[in-house]
Structure formats: C-alpha cells, structure tokens
Image (tube, grey):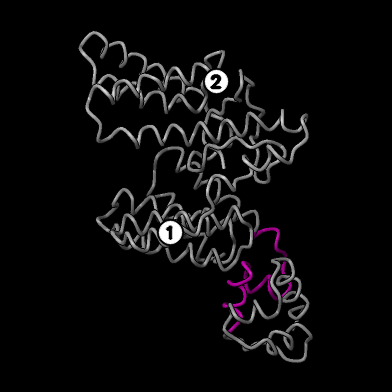
Amino acid sequence: MFNLSENLKALRVSRGFTQEQAAELLGVSKQSVSRWENGVTHPDITLLPVLASFYETTVDELLGSSREKTEKEKELVFQKRHQAHHEGNLREAYDLSQQLYDRFPNDRAVLNCVMRDSYLMGFHDMDGKRQAYLERSVAVSRRFLLLTEDMEERCRAIGNVAVCYKLLGDYEQALAWLNKLPSMWSSIENAALSVYDRETLKDDVPCSLDAVLHLLYRLIHASIDDRPQAEQLAVLQKIPVLFELLFEQGDYGFYNAFLAETYMKIAALSEDAEAKEMLARAQGCAENFAGKPTPGTPPCCSATIRSPLRSGPQHPEKPKENGWLTASTKMTG
C-alpha cells in the first residue's frame, strides 16, 4: 500500500506525538498504531480520511504523493485570511480559517486562527450567534491545549477560554481558567532581570518596556470607568505624557492607535476649545497609524515587539529604533 507505514510514522514523529498520544487522540489502541507503522497491518480504508485529517495532509499524500503542493495551498489561504483581517472583513477571515480547519484540524497555527476568529465573531455578535461562536472558540482552544506543550501557546489558549466564558456570562468558569495563568511576576520580562548579563539585558529592555507599556495602557483605561469625570480627565491626560517620555522622538508606531483612542476620550470630557484640539490630535494619530503599515504583518495578533532572544515570528522589516522603545507600526504575532 505504497509507503503508508513509513509515512504514518514520519508524520507522527514530525508532530512530536508518541504512539500513545496519537492513539489517544485518534481513539484507537497503541497496538494498532504500532502495527500500522511497522507494516504488520494497514488501517481500514474508512480510517484513511481520519488519519489524513489528523496528520494535516491528504489521503493521496498519506499514500505517498508530494506534500509540497498542500503546503503552498495552505500558505495561500493564510495570506488571504491575513488580508481579510487587514481590511476589517471578519466574516471572510472566519470562513477562511474554517476552510483551513476542515483540512488541517491539528495544525497549531490553524487552530490559533480558528480560536481567534471564532472569538472575534462572538465578541462582535456576528449574525446574532454570539454564544455559538464563543463556544466554538472554547472548544477549539481546548483542542489546542491537547496538542501543544509550548508555555506561551498554552497561556494564550487559556486566556482565550477565560475571556470567552466571561462573555458567555459564566463568571465562575472564567475565573477558574484565569487562575490557571501565571502572574506577571513569573513572566520572562521579570525573570530576565535576574538572568541576562548586562549586554543582553540592554538589548532586551526595549522589548520588556513595550510589553509593560501595553499592559499599563489597558490597566489605566480599565481603572477609570467608575471615577468622577474630573478624575478620569486627570488620569487620561497623563497617558500622552507617558508616551512622550518613552518615545523620545515622537514616532509612536502602532501606539498611535492607543493615543488616538485616548485623545478621543479626553475630548469627550473636555470643554469646547480643548475638545477641538484633542480631536485634531486624535485624527493626526489615526492618520499616522493608518499610514504606516508593516508589509506582510497581519493586524489581528498581539502588539508585543519581540527581541531576537524571544521565540516566535519577527518583524519582516526592522522597526525604527526610537528612544527607549522600538516603535511597531502594526500588531504582530
């Protein structure tokens, strides 16, 4: 039966599964997996589509055909999905991620897309089906957790489940999942201060400051909702000052989006003259943000700028170094 036994073993090993793990996920015995891979027996023909789906390939490729064409097709769909996000077309992005999932249900990059796109569809209550989309995001996140031991990937999936449960109104489950995550004191940014040598730490500081700034911005906005108007205004006015301190040359990159939102809120709380000035600043920041896309960068991922010491994708072009921080112009993943 062509090279089926060799392909089954090679595909399993390439994905880091033991025979026991593959058997558990496929719902068969370890002995069956072992016999298939040793060529003692072959899987029933009705199992071939299941095996092809499990190993993110096609039946033809499972039997020995080239895998190169499939990888190119998958990359093309990824690119179309990224473009759909860039254009703000959540529906098309979601449909494309589902198309990928139908063919590659165990590809971690695909699962991450489905997890994220399902969440966004639920968050925006697309088609009035918030519950269905959020429940799908939770289900895919749980499957994702079965397939990865990468700590950062696991934290991303766990955080997604917590947020989905919160939006579904199940606060108890949201807290239970939230408490599975480590605190910021266990983060690489904090531990690096005690591990890296001085030269390495100097290179890593901009990355750590960027992560802290992103979190600080969100915490500030979350903390003012119930405050009196005057106090909200006083706090919001400090955000541009903070950005001016950290970005010495005033090129805020991706953070132009944050500043535009802040200036809009300040304008809503201000008198006419100051409100007009704040609206003008918000418009300027929005134009700067929209006018500086990073080629090839999907706008649907996190905004963390990674140093060469961190794992994961890097910017396709080196961002401009600017003061303490390196300004990213779009969110990167």
Q: On the rendered structure, is 40 left or right of 303?
A: right
x then y, percent, for residue 106:
58, 66
Region of the chain picked out in magenta, as a range: 47-70
Q: Residue at x 28, y 52 (%)?
A: 125
Q: From the viewer's perspective, is the residue at label 1 or at label 2 nearer? A: 2
Give the answer, above or below, for where 40 lies relative to 226.
below
For the residue pair 306 and 132, the one nearer the viewer reads as 306
Q: Is residue 112 above or below residue 46?
A: above
Give the mark nearer the N terminus: 1 vs 2.
Answer: 1
Q: Quadrant of the N terminus?
A: bottom right
Residue 48 position within the rendered picture, expressed as x and y whole percent measured from the top left: 61, 80
Which residue corresponds to mark 1?
161
Q: CA distance from mark 1 to mark 2?
A: 33 Å
Placement of the C terminus among the 4 image quadrants? top right
Q: How many numbered discs?
A: 2
Residue 189 relative to residue 184: left or right: right
State the SS at label 2: helix
Residue in the picture at 57% in, 84% down: 27
Task: Specify the principal SS of the magenta part.
Answer: helix
- The residue lying at 42 percent from left, 19 percent from top is 240
Which residue is identified by label 2?
246
